[in-house]
Image (spheres, coloured by chain):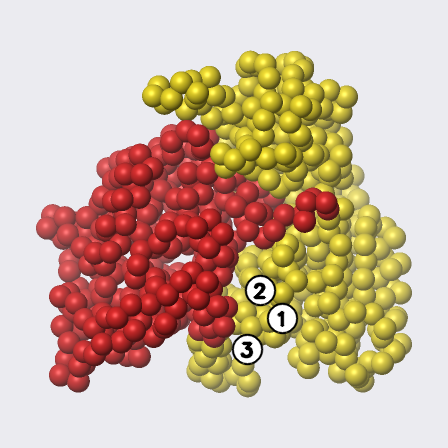
Chain colours: A yellow, B red
Amino acid sequence: MDILRFATAGSVDDGKSTLIGRLLFDSKAIFEDQLAAVERTSRDRGEEGTNLALLTDGLRAEREQGITIDVAYRYFATPRRKFIIADTPGHIQYTRNMVTGASTADLAIILVDARNGLTEQSRRHAFLTTLLRVPHLVLAVNKMDLVGYDQSVFEEICAEFSKFATKLEVQDLTFIPISALNGDNVVDRSANMPWYDGPSLLHHLEHLHIASDRNLIDVRFPVQYVIRPHASSDPELHDYRGYAGQVAGGVLKPGDEVLHMPSGFSTRIKKIELAGREVEEAFPPMSVTLLLDDDVDISRGDLICRPNNRPAAAQDIEGMVCWMSAERPLAARSRLVVKHTTRTVKAIVTDLNYRIDVNTLHRDETATQLGLNEIGRVRMRLTQPVFADPYSRNRLTGGMILIDEATNTTVGTVMITDAR
Amino acid sequence: MRSDYLLSQLDVLEAESIHIMREVAAEFERPALLFSGGKDSIVMLALAEKAFRPANIPFPVMHIDTGHNFPEVIDFRDRRVAELNVRLVVASVQESIDAGRAIEETGRWVSRNRLQTVTLLDAIEENRFDALFGGARRDEEKARAKERVFSFRDEFGQWDPKNQRPELWNLYNARIKRGEHIRVFPLSNWTELDIWDYIERENLEIPSIYYAHERLVFERDGILLADNEFLTRTEEEQPFTATVRYRTVGDMTITGAVVSSAATVAEVITEVAATRVTERGATRADDRVTEAAMEDRKREGYF
């Protein structure tokens, strides 16, 4: 059994919570006491029926305001797969939360109300999903029951979305007509829409091929921690020096020639250990320990790759930024701390190229700053190099977070387009 | 499995947890691991052992001792700590009460659950810990479903759910000022069933009370409590012997047992897979106070 992580985007009005509630309920991931608590609260508030949104909206403020504020993580499993749902809020003021949820997702479901068709919000969600390079996208046209299960309504929305998607880098797109409330095409194929010959949503989630989504070609091993046992009692361990980390790309095997950055020194992998046990290979997302043939001075923040395939040791970064701070804007000359893989350096923004309107995709080149939830393209200069790839090539070596040096909060994120 | 380079769900979760633990060891000066003797903290400790092998775990283990423990759990704790050669810090709720820092609750639910927060925050300050691993999982409770892996606490130990640091990819922001700390939850993405599957796969030892055994219990508000010295029964609360096991391990005063005949890990897994009630719903009186009981306690600095 493997894991599929997916993000859901849409507002309560689109039926997002109903859809999640149904997936959880039908896969028996909602328990009786949870359901009883939700029923009780719904009744106390005088609501008609059971408000399934209360299952996911866990914070006091969310319940009080009837909205989703933050990403909620939900879990369910079928005999084929374990699923992790990042349930993200739909409103524009929570763009940063949606970006957070999408960063690790294999797939995103964008919900559209069949009666309203595409809205500004659905376009924004599609844009953010592709900005974060979620490899698979599902446009779920919901509330088909309210448009009489009409094929032409569905196809019109699909055509409109397809046209919009040509402006984005969508890697894989699937359209599914559903009714979350009635369960049409959620778990089982619906008899109400005989004209639809695709899979149900759950079937699609269960069978989607995700093995090729990771980069298994470019070896990238950011060194996270050096393991040096101080046990004088065991002479075997006296010279033990293990480089621990999570594989960010490629396949590593004992005997492989590898290159250390920043030194440029080449050596071979002597042994790969996973939790103290020797293994024959390592690939993403395994957390392993590498032992090397030669004694090289390697520390946290360094990177191990192949001699003929290395990332840029870059001090000049260009990329798309999502700004996440309400306290301060991002502008040229902004000074920040950057965390990239296991390396933390200082940076200065040298240029804000443009701000992008997340609803229309219009680029405003006269913009001089980015505020909370705004997205734009920036250029930055780092005090020390990071070992980076374009985000389109590798999400882990191509992404970084921005930290405010005074408050220590995470104020933004960068998807690298160009690293030199 | 290996031909398409896909890992099983347990391997993915293990890799993620190990990454988180190494990140903490690398970025913080004085981390510690909160260990209750419950199954989640046992899995967490096993992962810590794996993350740093063949070296010893590079941080101490801390137990917040309420004094209302199951004796089986304390025995287990001491044995495990000795095996792993880690330092154990015990912070005692009784000492907080004796020092006048905490006031014992009275009434029918004489729980020391809430008092633990005082002891925990005092111990963090006294030991100058800057990061604490907790075994909480997001599937346990709805406030936890929204909490970050690296959960920031201010100098009063408080959690501010509306002002959490965005967490992208596998990048965690570990920066804090003096007096602040981070609670770290490496098991965030594990479910109850994952924990049991892992206990089975790794052949981990857990305290005997997790398996079916005979015990003198009484019923209170639908929860089966062990007949114990810390709780006073009323007339109607007559004790009786039942075959039970525990799904969670907390204080004897608030942790309920479930009627069960599951005597092995495999039998427990079958039972958990078929159950229709959450582990906290079934067995924890501390979550029943209000709809947002957990959020409120976490804001105050609870686990």
Q: Quadrant of residue A264?
A: top right
x and y percent of residue B118 in the render?
A: 24, 51
Q: Which mark is residue A51?
A: 3
Mark 1–mark 3 distance (CA, rounded to whole Å): 15 Å
The reply to the same-chain question for discs 1 and 3 is: yes
Q: Residue at x 31, y 44 (%)?
A: B80
Chain to which mark 2 belongs: A
Q: Secondary structure at mark 1?
A: helix
* Other-residue count near label 2 (Cα within 10 Å), few / some / many at <14 / 14–19 / ≥20: some
Mark 3–mark 2 distance (CA, rounded to whole Å): 20 Å
- Residue B287: in sight, yes or no? no
Q: Which residue is mark 2?
A: A76
Q: Secondary structure at mark 3?
A: loop
Q: Residue at x 73, y 46 (%)?
A: B4
Q: Nearer the viewer, residue A88 or A191?
A: A191
Q: Residue at x 55, y 85 (%)?
A: A49
Q: Which residue is mark 1?
A: A23
Dots 1 and 2: beta carbons under 8 Å? yes
User: Which of the marked residues, 3 or 2, is nearer the chain's N terminus?
Assistant: 3
x and y percent of residue A406 in the render?
A: 47, 33
* Other-residue count near label 3 (Cα within 10 Å), few / some / many at <14 / 14–19 / ≥20: some
